[in-house]
Amino acid sequence: KGKAGGVVWKPLDEPERGTRALRLWVRFLSETESDSEDKMDTVGGEGKTMTLFRAVVTSVCLPQIRLALLRHWVDVQESEKAVALVSAWQPPLLSEHAHALLIAACVLPRLAEGINQWHPRSASSVPLHSWIHPWLPLFSAASNTLIEAAAGNDALSAVRASQAATNSPLSQLFSHVRAKLAVVVSQAPSPDDSVRRLVAAWQGVLDAQSFSDFIARTVVPKLAQTMRLVQVRPDAQNLQPLHCVLKWVGVVPDEAMAELLSQHFFPQWHEVLRLWLSSPMVNMEEVQNWYRGWKATFPPQVLAQATTQHHFVAALRAMQAASSGAVLPPPPPALPPPLLPQPPQPAFAPPPPPPEDDMQESGGAMKLEDLIGELAVQNDLLMLPKPRRFERGKQVFAFGRATFFVDRDVVYVLRQRDMQWVPVSLDELVARGRGAGEGAPGAQSGGGPAFF
């Protein structure tokens, strides 16, 4: 609690107290100094009087705001009061730099801690986006201010700006978000609507490249597992697993969705169609209705993909051959996946980043080993480092009955049959830690490695 003139001020309960009067003073001082020459003596075009005014506000009010955010803001998932407080003291009451530092020092670390402790299945938890998104307008301005301050105006300003953006508190916060969402996707029994809503809320918030990478490395392997549950048959078709996957259209890129179906749905679909067409009792009208029904199942944006059209055209050719009594053509070969656009290369390369271990020990983004340790606790598995055991310079860990290490955010597990290190997903690591055989369901390498 702060006291001003004997009156107790509780910033979280009265975020705008005194701000109206202070804003009037800011306007008055700005108008008074608009034609004054003393502003030439200060940096940023402010006069001496305005500089002294900001110094008073910073020394009297700012400590109370910091104290409220660090000590009295108990539950970070209840963000309404804290957002109102930081919003009320935006520039011009505080300078842009002071306001940005307030967010970087008192808000972002609290939110990062809250993200690390957040569990979606907890009775008291609320979705990540519901208590982080209200901060985003404030974060954007603060991040730009700190990046500009770090860049300077010399020949290397572009390099420093790029480094500042990569290592900014906001960038590190989003790294925590991606890591926590990856755990949520990995642990979910199926990629249902609840998981999709949690992930979709960050589309357009995370930058397009990192969100696309996150989808490819965490969501698509989970959807592939669900697609394996689809059994294509002409009668009594159960479409629930397929509908679960197709609900991700719009979140998963259309090209990736089409490629997923090409790999995990259409081979079985073509096989059933060929068996049906080869039957001497085949009814072509029923086959045509079946074909139309399946085509109507897929959203237009998926049907528009060349990969999807490739399979439906091949099915039409097989149906035409069966109608004319000709030999059925072979199943269509898979099309190569489309090339992904590469980000533009800078005119000159920035200095290399610090070693990975140094970056992780600096307390920025959550380490993948920490997330795996959380999985070990939740699955009653023992995770311990193996003394004097390293692979590629990385510590090797025992994880239940499995042995693994992490290199560049990819999990490698020791395959017992040939003693080779192979990349695995987090689901597969848990399955192997429990003793599931390398050929057992849930222990295949098809789920994709675990990336962050």
Image: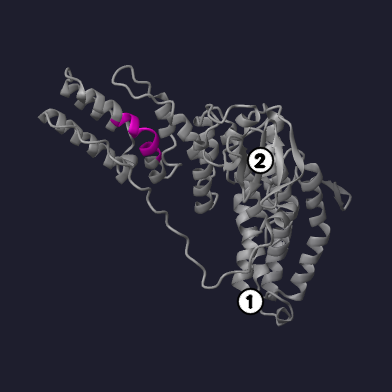
Q: Label 1, label 2: how many angstroms apart (C-alpha)?
A: 47 Å
| 164 versus 204 height, above or below | below
Q: Is any atom of residue 360 visible in this view?
A: yes
Q: Earlier in the sequence, mark 1 or mark 2?
A: 1
| Start-end of magenta stretch | 260-270
Q: Amino acid at mark 2?
A: Phe
Residue 400 at x, y = what percent?
70, 31
Question: CB atoms at circles 1 and 2 under 8 Å apart?
Answer: no
| 424 versus 138 height, above or below | above
Q: Residue at 60% x, 50% y: name it.
A: 136
Question: Regarding mark 1 in the picture, which secondary structure is present there?
Answer: loop
Residue 214 at x, y = what percent?
53, 46
Q: Residue at 62% x, 39% y: name it.
A: 414
Name the residue that disc number 1 marks. 153
| 292 versus 363 height, above or below | above
* Residue farthest toward the front in the current orientation of the protein: 418
Front residue of 449/129: it is: 449
